[in-house]
Amino acid sequence: MSVHASWYLTLAALLFTIGAVGLLVRRNVLVMFMCIELMLNAANLTFVTFARALNDIGGQVAVFFVLVVAAAEVVVGLGIIVAIFRRKVGATADDAHLLKG
Amino acid sequence: MLAPGAGPIVLTGITTSQRAFPYLTALVLVPVVAAFVVMCLPRRSTGAIRAAGLAGALGVLGIAAAVLDQFQAGDGGYQMVSDHAWVAPLGISWTLGVDGISLFLLLMTAVLFVLALLGTNERHNTKAFTAWMLLLEAGCVGSFLSLDVLLFFLFFELTLVPTYFVIGGWGHERRGYAATKFFLYTFAASAFMLVGIVALVFLPQSQTGVTTFDVRSLAATHLSGTAEMLLFLAFTAAFAVKAPIFPFHTWSPDAYGEAPAAGSVILAGVMAKLGTYGIVRFDLGLFPHAVVVIAPLLLTLGVVGIVYGGIVAAVQKDLKRLVAYSSLAHLGFIVVGAFALTGEALSGAVLQMVNHGLYTAALFILIAMIYRRRGTFQIPRLRGLHGGRFARCGGEALRSRLAVGPRTERNPARLVR
Amino acid sequence: MIHAAFLIPLFPLVGFAVLAPFGRKLGNPLAGWIATLLVAASFVVTVLVFVALFRIAPAHRSVTEPWFDWISVDRLRVGAGLLVDPLSLTMASFVTGVSALIHLYSIGYMRHDEQFPKFFTYLNLFVFSMLMLVLADNFVLSFLGWEGVGVCSYFLIAFWFDRAEAASAGKKAMIFNRIGDAGFLLGIFLVFERTGSVQYTTVFARLGHVGTPSLVAIALLLFLGAVGKSAQIPLFPWLADAMAGPTPVSALIHAATMVTAGVYLMCRINPVLHLAPDAAHVIAWVGVATAFVGATSACAQDDIKKVLAYSTVSQLGYMFLAAGSGAYVAAIFLMLTHAFYKALLFLGAGSVIHAMDEDQDIKNMGGLAKLMPITGVTFLVGWLSIAGVPPFSGFWSKGDVLQNAWAVTPALWAIGAVTAALTAYYMGREYFLVFQGQRRWVEARPEASHGPEHGESYTARGLHPHDPTWHMSVPLVVLAALAVLGGLVNLPFHPSLVFLERWLSPVVGATLLQHHFSAGAEWLFALVDAALAILGVAVAAALWRKSSDRPALEPRFLSMAWWVDAAEDRLVARTGEALASFTATVVESRVVDGAVNGVASLVRTTGERLRRVQSGYVRSYALGLTAGVVVLLAYLLVRVGS
């Protein structure tokens, strides 16, 4: 392989961190979703890298599962967000605090 | 009562006279059946409900009398044992048996429930009240008769729920507080006992490989010193709150004071004895070495309870709370008798259990009569009651002053201002 | 015939059992007659048993009649049964005899009372308890009777329960008695601990094995019981207050029977006292001190019954002086004669109170002797007896006590002698103020009605004093005769005349103080006794026959009985109450219950704090998740790395 696996892993780690920080810091719900997608795809990249490095097809199979789950999650999540936006137009993540104990 | 993998209840052999009538199981089931009957009656027919309730209580009394008749004095072990496996893999069984100690407590319970149901009259929602009282009776009777430790625990806890409802539903002004305090305090304390029970069963099990909850087998197991002491403390935590022993007694003035008349009768007369009975049967029976070590502490607590109960009772203005604190004092005698560790003292303790049940019940019924006529429990507002009712007032005063046994009680607090 | 002894306590018990449920129906006066006849029957049986016992040789005059095994647990074996011996029968005879007379008297005295049947119910129960006390064959059964008389005295003192001072007096009597009872109980426990039995005969046989300190402790603890029951220092204030009860009650319980239970106990345990002379000395000194305090207090009382109450305290002191001196026969002799003349005095006082329309203040009386001849003469007899004027019974009995006191130490005799003179004086004061001198009350006009006008004081209404009905007069006369002749029981002139001493010797003979005075010394004692009595009589006559107002002779210190009651109230009762209030309000509510409620509030505040974790913000949950993952990863990396 021309590019060593560690570069891919580093990239994946960076992407994951960006996604995590973005999730924690941003208030816009859609941006939070995008960050979640970023984290999921970072994980995908890691899986594929290891699949190639260890010559194991299992990693690529895992990616399929993750993609399906991500898609389902987006569907449900966007549905919830639309419901929240219908109530209040400029809603952020902080506005959904009805479950406060 | 099906346990996974155990199949339906297996009727194993009954260990005394062949094909004998299962008196003890009947004693527990009759009030449950009566409660069920009461629940089926229409709410309006208070007469029928009271009749059904009384019939249940009288049924228990009748069977208890039969047990007394059949009992062989002088035979040291348990008699009329009913033994059916329940959760066989865990060694839990439906084991009921009676011996000298439980026999008289059983009779006292039967008599007191009849008196409680007869002598008091709850007009509001009689149906639920009678049903709860009958379930309470089943719980109390079962506790006194259980030879299986977990079954004992089950009945012990089972008495808490009806009592909570009786106090909370038919009590006086602060009934909510009193009921909750009673329930939570005794329940929390018996949580310790549950841990103790499990440890008690599974500690020897790792040595002998046999899992059994039967108190007769458990009494024979060998425990290390620390284990025995810790288990003793766990069990005694529950009994100390139930009895009550100073300083775990503060639920009782509230509970006795706010409970309705029948509730107070049973609370003071029967349920307090569950704690002391537990001490005698389980503490003294299962943990003899720990008892010897810790006896001085419990004797001290008992004596403190006697004096403290008397002192605090002396300044009470509420009749029911006065009796509650004097009960603390009298139960202190039972504790002292149990932990003095001599035959005479133990006999005295058991005798005092029965005596105290009877005269405290009499006192609470009399107080209820006073309340019905004067509308107050406050002593400063009661004057000149003595006329006309000699037979009961004088009888009670005589009975409570002249109760003499191997340990004559003296109550410096029996004052009515 | 001795086997019929069980009937003695049985008759009054039957009376109680019948009158308690049916007394109201039987009514007035049938309930009274049933009670009286049953006690009289008891007396008859006692006399018959007495005669039967007399026929047995002195050495064997101790018969145990066992009934049943009462308590039988391990080493503790308490039976229920009777001990028929000279001491218990002597007690039983005057208890039943005097009780029967008082029952008869009560039929007249309580005639107008609505609760007539209840009175007799209690009286019978009382007599039963007292008989159980004196006839029992073991300490525990005696204690049953002891407690029984205590309870009955509560019922009877507080009989007029709607009167505040009566209710309070009943309570006071019960509480003071209870303090003594604690001592009695501890004494019984110690007896059992040291001798292994509670039966009198067994215990006394085993005393040799018990060490002296234990014997002294036993004696003093049992004496504490006697102090409570027999109103000695410091537990005597209840007896004066107890005069709030009906006069027959005062006569029965506080003169003739219940208070003598303590003296009986001391005589019964004479083997113990014999082996514990230190305890006996304490008893003698407490007795003589009480005698003095009681007598001085009686000198300043204005209530006709309170004079008699303090007099009783004083006379009981004499009895303990005798018991503590080892002169048990003298104690019983005095008890016997005291029963006669004190009951007589009380019943006479009752007659006067009836005549004075319930006024009990002697300062409002006077000149009654001519109007109430029977009462006056019998009261005079009672006075002369208690004063110790020869040849009345008191002279002989008190003489015996004083003589034996000298044998222990002359100091005891001296205090006793002064008290004897005081006794003659204060009773004389009472006699003259009530029966002689000017009439300090208003006589009713013949046409005036007898009933009280609403709102009028009794002095304004006008009184019509006269002797009472035969129910009340007959006992007065009988008791007066006994007070006169009672001395015949134990005349010291010749050994053949000391009947009582010979009769009681099987029980107390071994431990009697053996001090023989020469005949000359005995005559000297007698002369001094007579002189003291006549001195007291003369002083009383001189001071009180003409005048009724001498405040200098009635200082508050004496009329308040040396302030003992007030002191005990302040030192013991008030501090006790303060301590109890403190315990109930501070310790119980704040500390003990506070701990329980504190646990509950701790749980609540912890919950409130923990609640803040649930902020409702998705981002903080996400932060939590992330932080948790980081920690886990770090942990795993460290684990894998090492």
Image: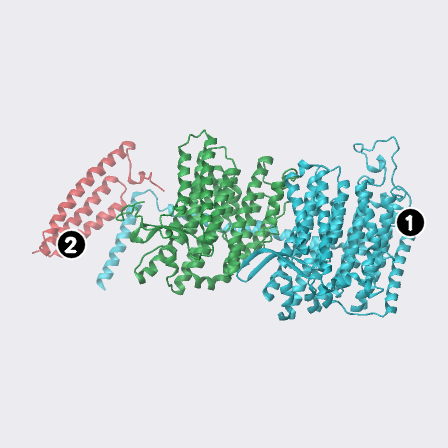
Q: Residues within 10 Å of mark 2 (few under 14, many from 20)?
A: some
- The three-letter amino acid code for the residue at tag 1 is Arg
Same chain under badges 1 and 2? The reply is no
Q: Which of the colour schemes (rainbow, by chain, secondary structure, one colour) is used?
A: by chain
Q: Nearer the viewer, mark 1 or mark 2?
A: 1
Numbered tag placed on residue C545 in the rendering:
1
Which image quadrant: the N terminus of chain C?
bottom right
Q: Position of residue C374 (x, y in %)?
A: 86, 44
Q: Secondary structure at mark 1?
A: loop
Q: Nearer the viewer, residue C366 or B78?
A: B78
Q: Residues within 10 Å of mark 1 (few under 14, many from 20)?
A: many
Q: Which chain is red?
A: A
Numbered tag placed on residue A9 in the rendering:
2
Q: Is residue B381 visible?
A: yes
Q: Residue at x 67, y 64 (%)?
A: C219
Q: Is residue C69 left or right of residue C234?
A: left
Q: Is residue B186 above or below residue C329?
A: above
Q: Is residue C567 visible?
A: no
Q: Residue furthest top?
A: B44
Q: Secondary structure at mark 2?
A: helix
Q: Which chain is green?
A: B
Q: Which chain is cyan?
A: C
Which image quadrant: the C terminus of chain C?
bottom left
Q: Determine contact: label 1, label 2, CB under 8 Å.
A: no
- The three-letter amino acid code for the residue at tag 2 is Leu
Quote the CA–CA distance across marks 1 and 2: 130 Å
Q: Is residue C125 left or right of residue B167?
A: right
Q: Quadrant of residue C21?
A: top right
Q: Position of residue A88 (x, y in %)?
A: 29, 33
Q: Is residue B230 left or right of residue C529?
A: left
